[in-house]
Image (cartoon, rainbow, N blue to C red):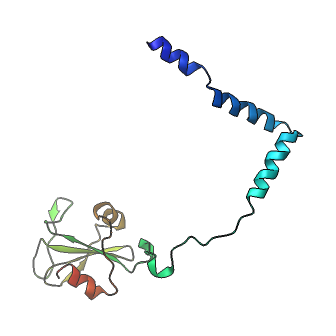
Amino acid sequence: MFHRIRRRAAELNEAEGQFFELSARLQQPDSPEAERVWAELERGKQFAAVDDFLPPELRVPSRDQLGGMMMPWTQPLVLDGEMVACSECGAYRDWLILCTRDQVWLRCRAGHQQLETRLDTAWYNRNSGPTVSRHATFEDCLRHHGH
């Protein structure tokens, strides 16, 4: 059985043989067939340009076009073996993690915000999921997340 598989793999099928034969003929510099194929290709390039992009109101902005991103983080956040707590109220869970201008901010449920220098945009991108909603203002986004 394995001999049949090896023999079949070694043989060129008919389509492959035709392809190699045609490509060898097209490699010859002054071949009439090469000139005919190139002429067909040139004729095929003459087509009407079609604007196939979405209208601006339906386009989703990329991450670099957004003012910032936000994700909930309900469990305690542990960095460098230390649990992060709010510097004002001492809360240690139920964070909103904000990523804006290459900085990561933590916001507790009470509304206190603190810059977290141990986190960066790469960490945020690794831990955040896909964007599920877009909001016009920061307050709309906070309401969406229940803060």
Viewer-proximal residue among 29 and 15: 15
Percent of width and height locating residue 14: 64, 27
Is residue 132 rendered to the left or right of residue 45? left
Task: Pick the quarter of the image with the C terminus.
Answer: bottom left
Residue drawn at point x = 46 percent, y = 82 percent: 57
Residue drawn at point x = 13 percent, y = 84 percent: 110
Vertical placement of residue 110 versus 9, above or below: below
Viewer-proximal residue among 13 and 112: 13
Is residue 116 rendered to the left or right of residue 34? left
Residue drawn at point x = 64 percent, y = 30 percent: 16
Percent of width and height locating residue 43: 78, 57
Is residue 100 rendered to the left or right of residue 71? right
Is residue 55 rendered to the left or right of residue 116? right
Q: Residue furthest left?
A: 90
Vertical placement of residue 128 versus 97, above or below: above
Q: Quadrant of residue 71?
A: bottom left
Q: Quadrant of residue 44?
A: bottom right
Percent of width and height locating residue 118: 28, 67
